[in-house]
Structure formats: structure tokens, C-alpha cells
Image: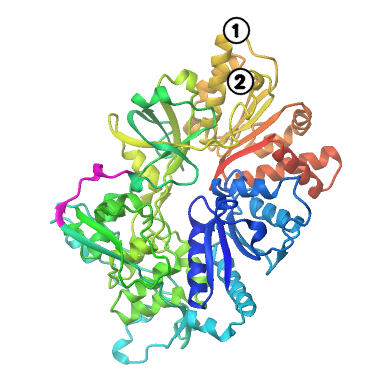
Amino acid sequence: MDFLITYGSHTGQSESIAAQLKEKCMLLGMNPRVHVLEENEKTFFIENEPLAVIIVSSTGDGDPPENAARFLRRISRRTLADDFLKNVTYALLGLGDSNYSTYQGVPRKFDEQLTKLGAKKLIPTGEADDEIGLELVVEPWIEQLLKKLCELDHIPISRLEGLTISTPLVKKEKEKKSVAEKPKLPTVMSTEDDRADSSTDRILKLAPYTYPGEISLIRGNEALSSDEALRVPIAPLTYLVTSVTHEKFEPKSVNWQNGESMPGLQGKPMDATVVGTTLLTDFDVHKPKRELVIDLNAHWDQLSYSPGDAFYFLQPNPEAEVNFILERMGLLMMADQKCHVTVAGDAKKPNAAVPGYIPPISSLRYIFTHCLDIRRAPGRPVLRVFADATSDEGEKRRLLELCSSQGMAEFTAHIRQAAVSIVDVLAAFPGVRPAPERLIEQLPRLIPRPYSVSNCYERARGRIRFVYSEMKFGVADGRRYERLGLATEWLNALRVGDQIQVMMKEPARFRFPVPPATVEAGLKMPLLMIGPGTGVSTFISFLDLLLHEKIKIGSLPAVPRKLFFGCRNFEKDFIYKDLLESYVREGILDELIACESQPAKPVPGRHCYVQEALRQRADEVWDFIQLEESRIFICGDAKAMSKDTWECFAKIVAEKKGCSDAEAKAFLLELKKANRYIEDVWA
């Protein structure tokens, strides 16, 4: 059976699921085609597809991924007939993160428009939540879809059993080395660490760690450990071959990630020089905040950006973690030699190809440093590969448990939610020695991290300022070494004079002035800005532009411009306090409302959280919303803040309009559609 699988993806999750689904369908004898959504009206025409499987995610600001936006605009045209898609049957899987107020906004819009144009659902739409684990919805949804596809293609349902294998419980006494059965677990460092000090290469040092005595990464619950018939997916088909030569590889001889395009990135990598690094808070606060200033040198004259825009930083994986993986594979000594990656001559995978972001000739160090994401919690296909890469029966059994249908809850708890990395898993299972091509096949692409500018182009003079928070993850829950976030760890190590590369992020709705308004129109826009923590740094670029315009024309139109800021302690982490207060004195801001959640001493009348301040000023907020061209901007950490602020506005609207909660949220959604309630939040 021929049918379409199409996806829209920013980070690659949807694309990966589409590829896995295609492979399963091919094994069942079906012949699906996989295309990105932006290929509609180029490679395929959705109205001519009798059956389409659509996998799409939402971005943080509620917009579709760049490679799905044109498709959504197409099916949203008012000129389309109500029966435009009457011949289409579809199955839709939505990926999202419930930390965001826009959770599943794009998939639900797809659903609404497809149904409105006459398309019929094959199965109920799946809504997967990355906050709790996408697999909890994705796997059952795929299973339901495959059953329906088999029915349509007259394939016996029993064929689905060929997608899994039944793994009997190890019985032999000599094989009872199951990690789950070990009464004690070693707290010594792995052999990788024993060799670290005698090597010129830096290799990660693991912290002494004892796994919990009950259920953990290396030990399943009793029911799972004693299950005699695990339902385990068959191993992903291998299709690549790596070969290493005696020649040294020169990293500068290739383009970053082979020059492969990526949704959301604009242009090519630009060389930049670090010209400033500053700690903005006390060092002992919960999340220290730092400022980084870069000079784009010769690229500046060809560049332009607006307040609210962001740049992607092309951060590498940490050398010590890369070396750990390379040594585990037994390839550290040849990591810098030229490595050729090609499709195996006997590859059984249909349409097998080397991933576009892997240079055909580079080195293993380059691939694992710049191309593959080794920090993201590994998916079940990776664990399935690991199970085949160990000779230890106990390790194999536990890895298969984590891959199995019965082990889904433990996979979610001990892999996804514990946020363990590839290194953590290898440390927990020392017998696993995967082949490099298997990791190249299964690990996701390394995605650069975006940071918003915090000064305006007109006043930057070639030097752009960014602010970021440190995220620290301790030794716990199976994590074997303390770490910061991937990008922040690299950013913290930068020093003045260091050379780095950045790329422009495709402009989003979160900009000032709000597109398509001109700067002149933006000066007349009433602004209500909410920026706790590092979120305030983006608004400094807004205010910087307003200051520039004031200096240029002498004065600004008298419209409300209010900024709500929140931090834990004014003495320790009120970043840019003096600068923000100067904007008030200059008349750029008419009010700065600062909230302090953990003051050294409670201050009467001072709000703890931004939401409290908004509720206290409900009348003022409602009056602001009524102003023509008023804009509400929200920037910061999505966890709780985005949803709590959304709920806060909904309560204010419901109270002032005298309507229900649902009606208030519908009102806010209309503000969003009109670009009057705009978010830039991250999880």
C-alpha cells in the first residue's frame, strides 16, 4: 500500500518518528513515502493523497515549525472549498510540551483545518507531551495506527508480532548476572577513569555512585525483572559503514555539519570574537546569570536584526564526554584520523543514506563533537542497539526491559525524566561497546542553542550582548557526573579573545516593533512587558531601541510602557537594576514593577511573584488591554511561568468581562492571533 507520511519538525523529533514509522511499515510490506510538510505542492499535493499520516510539533511561541508553516497557511486559506480535502483520510500525531500555554496549539489547528476541509480521521489524534515523556503517547498511537493500516491493506494483524521479539527470562545460573539481581553495585570509577590520568586526552571522571537498592536505571521492579516474555522491538536496521584511514583530519576543511540546512536557522555560520563576559548575580544564587558580548567583525556590515531576535550559538559537545564514548568504543586512539561514512553495500534499510549533517569525510571526534547530540536522554532505539552491543547477559536483559512494552513506565522514569545522557547509560552498563556507525545511525542531530539579543542594532556598534542562566544537574537519578546545561557549560568556559561561530535565528513574532509595523508605529504602541529572570534581557533590547529613538527625535509619544520583573532576591539577582531604573528616569518606561520571591526580610506591600502584581493591578491591566494597538510581551522560563501568567490573564479577563474561564481564554487566543499577546518562552 502506497501512502504519505509527512512531518513538520524543528528539533528533529517529528522527523525521527516519521522515519521509525516508515521502517515499521516497510517491514510489514507497505510502501509509504516520507516528505517534509513544506514539500506540499512540490513533491506531493495533500488534496490528492487518499491517506496521509501527519506528525507535527508546536514551537515555544505557538507557531508551527518553519518547515510546516507554509502547509498550515495553505490549508487555512479562506478561498478553499469546504470539500477541498474530501478524498483525504488522515492520522495526526501532535508533539508538544505542557509547560507552554500554547501546548498542542499547532497540531490542534491542523486538526481543525483538515476536518473543516472535509478530511476524515483514520484514528483519534495523538497528543504527546514532552514534559512527561513523548513515548507514553507515541508508542500506543503508532501501535493503533499500524493495526488500522494492516486492516486497510488486508495484512493479517499477526504480522505485527514480527515487529517485536519475545525475550525469555535468563534461567542459567551462570547467566544470572542480571543487573537487577546484584545485591551491591560498584561505586568505583570505570576503567575509562583509571586510564584518564595516564593519557594526554581528557576523559570524563565519573563520581562514585551507588544506585538505589530498589528500582533504578540498572534494576527493574520485580514484575518486570521476572517477566518471562518481554515484548521487545526488533533492532533498528543497520545501514552505515565507517572506515578510518591513517591520515589526520583537519576540522577546518569541512563546513559545520556538512553545510546541511536546519529549520529556524538563517544564513551561514558567522565567525565572532568574544569581547566580554560578566557574572551578573552573586555566584551562589539558584541559577547564576551571566552576560556574554561578542563582536561579529566583518559580518556586521551585512547584518541587521530587531529587538526580540536571537542568534544560535554553535556549541560543541564537551571533550571529556566525547572521549569517554570514543574510548568505550575502543576508538580513542584513532579519533582524529580521517573517517569515511558510507552506506553499506548490503544495507537492507530502504532508501538508506548518510544523514545530510554528517560529512562524508571527517573524523570520529568531529562527528561526536559537532554533529551528534550525546547529552539528550537516549531513545528506546538507542537502548535496543546497546542491548545487542553487550556480551553481559544481565546488562542485555535490563536494557531490553527498558526497551520493552512492559518497561515503558521505567524507561520514562529512569531515562527520560531522569535526563541521563549516553555517557550515564554507558557508565551504568560497562559491557556495552557499540559500533560507531550504530550511534551515527541512531543519535539525533546536535541542535545549536538560541539566545535573544539584549541590545538594539542601532546602539550595538558591532557588539551584541546576550544573557543566560546556568542550569546545574547534580549526581543523582542515574546521572554519574555533575554538569551544567550543554550550551551554558561551553559559554562559561569562553574567555575574551576566543573565536566562536553563531547563526541568525529566523525572525519570529516576538519582535519590536511587531511586524509589519514600522519603528515609527512601534513608538506609539502601549507595551506591557513581563520578564522574570533572564527574560528581562530581551526587553532591554526593546528599551534600548526606544532610547535610541528618543535621542534621535527628542521625545517619545506618551503611551503606557510597563515592565514587570521578578527574581528571588533583590540583593543577589536583580540583574540590570541600575539600567532599568535609568529607563524610568529617562521616560522610556513609565513604571518598573519588581517582584521578589525570597527576600532576606519580607517587605510590606512588595509582591513575591509577577502574577500577584498583575492580579493586584487587575483594573489597570484590563484598561491596558482595551487600548488600541496595545501589546503584551512575555519572556522567560516556560516551567510554570508561562502557564501561570496565562491563567492569571484569563482570571482578570473573566472577572472584568463577566464571562466564563473558557470564554476568557478564547478572548486571549484572539489577542494571540492578532499578535497582541506574544510569548518567547523556553523549557
Q: Secondary structure at mark 1?
A: loop
Instruction: Residue type at mark 1: give it.
Output: Gly
| Image mark for residue 519 | 2
Secondary structure beneath dot 2 equals: helix
Where, quadrant-wise, is the N terminus in this rendering? Answer: bottom right
Quarter holding residue 424 = bottom left
- Closest to the observer: 226 or 447? 447
Left or right: 176, with 18 as reference point: left
Q: Is residue 471 placed above or below 531 in the rendered structure? A: below
Residue 89 higher or lower than 401, as above or below: above
Coordinates of residue 246 in the picture (x, y in percent): 13, 57
Q: Amino acid at mark 2?
A: Val
Is residue 330 shown above or below 387?
Answer: above
Q: As drawn, which residue projects farthest toward the top?
A: 554
Q: Count neighbours of disc 1 (C-alpha within 10 A) and say few if under 14, some if 14 to 19, many if 20 or more.
A: few
Point out the stretch of residues depicted in magenta: 246-255
Q: Position of residue 654 (x, y in %)?
A: 81, 42
Is 164 left, or right, of 433 in this rendering?
right
Residue 66 spot, x, y in % from top left: 55, 45
Q: Tell which residue pokes out farthest to the right in this image.
A: 658
Circle on res. 554: 1
State the residue at coordinates (61%, 72%). Answer: 145
Closest to the observer, 523 or 111: 111
At a point 68% along the width and 30% down the height, the residue shown is: 631
Residue 662, magenta (yes or no):
no
24 or 589, which lies in front?
24
